[in-house]
Image: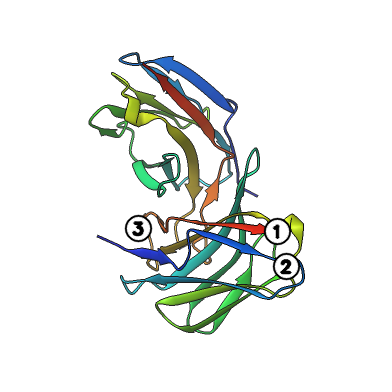
């Protein structure tokens, strides 16, 4: 079974702090994703990476950055945390698709982040 | 751009009843894939069922089945004999094949919160 591990289930930080959320997957997937999940808004893509050191902005990248130095690890960074970044953060991974394949994403347990 | 719409933000049904969650999507492509994901309270999101658009037969996984209407761009999820453990948020999702979608991004609906009542 694919295992996607997020470093913290719950995290409380203060406004202005630099926050790191870590995600590790054990299935050698090329693609990794960071989402935030808010009531009524569903999942919104923050950033994704399709290879080591490669990253692309999702739908809401402002206030976030990412790092992917190793294939199995994808980090989300809140450069200067603000209260509107209080949310549930989900990491996911997915193998690179063949031309016509349809592998689903595999998700971590999520990190509930509170910014005070 | 592709979009996914789940028109029911929240639903409640009695245990053992059958419930249908609706999902519609919009795309101009003819080949794509559809998924239903389940996120139980405080637990990991997991795949429930998947459907390839080129397959006419509706996918089934035990008590979960889909009604895929390609012309109507509809992909509803039916849960038969619902159980308390089916209480969760359900997300419908859409993805294009890599031949079209270099980014491999999956597009999610906003979710339907389903409560199974004892």
- Residue A34 locus on image (x, y percent): 55, 63
Q: Secondary structure at mark 1?
A: helix
Above-or-below relation of A23 to B116: below
Residue A78, image x, y percentages: 67, 71
**Alpha carbons under labels 3 and 2: distance apart:** 38 Å
Q: Nearer the viewer, mark 3 or mark 2?
A: 2
Residue annotated with mark 2: A81
Q: Residue at x 77, y 71 (%)?
A: A16
Quarter of the view holding residue A56? bottom right
Query: Do the numbered discs 2 and 1 sit on residues whose CB atoms are within 8 Å?
Result: yes
Mark 2 crowdedness (10 Å alpha carbons): few <14, some 14-19, many ≥20: many
Q: Residue B37: x, y in percent?
A: 42, 42
Q: Where residue A61 is drawn, which disc sits there? A: none
In the rendered structure, which disc, 1 or 3, sits on the residue that comes first in sequence? 1
Q: Chain of mark 3?
A: A
The quarter holding residue A45 reads bottom right
Label 1 sits on residue: A85
The residue labelled by disc 3 is: A101
Residue A28 vertical position relative to residue B68 in the rendered view, above or below: below
Q: Is residue B55 above or below residue A17?
A: above
Nearer the observer, B76 or B114 = B114
Distance Cα–Cα, label 1 vs label 3: 35 Å
**Badge 2 and badge 1 in a common chain:** yes
Question: Which residue does the image show at 34% across and 13% down from the upper left?
Answer: B17
Relative side of B1 to B108, left or right = right
């Amino acid at each position: 079974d694919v295992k996607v591990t997020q470093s913290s289930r719950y995290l409380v930080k203060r406004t202005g702090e630099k926050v790191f959320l870590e995600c590790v997957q054990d299935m050698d997937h090329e693609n990794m994703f960071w989402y935030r999940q808010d009531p009524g808004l569903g999942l919104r893509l923050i950033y994704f990476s399709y290879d080591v050191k490669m990253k692309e902005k999702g739908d809401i990248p402002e206030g976030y950055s990412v790092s992917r130095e190793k294939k199995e690890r994808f980090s989300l960074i809140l450069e200067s945390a603000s209260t509107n970044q209080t949310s549930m953060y989900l990491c996911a991974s997915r193998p690179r698709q063949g031309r016509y394949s349809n592998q689903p994403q595999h998700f971590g347990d999520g990190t509930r982040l509170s910014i005070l | 751009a592709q979009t996914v719409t789940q028109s029911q933000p929240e639903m409640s049904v009695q245990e053992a009843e059958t419930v249908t969650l609706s999902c519609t999507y919009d795309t101009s492509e003819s080949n794509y894939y559809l998924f239903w994901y389940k996120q139980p309270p405080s637990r990991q999101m997991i795949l429930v069922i998947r459907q390839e658009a080129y397959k006419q037969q509706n996918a089934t996984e035990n008590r979960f089945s889909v009604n895929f209407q390609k012309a109507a761009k509809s992909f509803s999820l039916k849960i038969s004999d619902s159980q308390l453990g089916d209480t969760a948020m359900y997300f419908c999702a859409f993805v294009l094949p890599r031949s079209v979608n270099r980014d491999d991004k999956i597009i999610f609906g906003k979710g339907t919160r389903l409560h199974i009542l004892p």
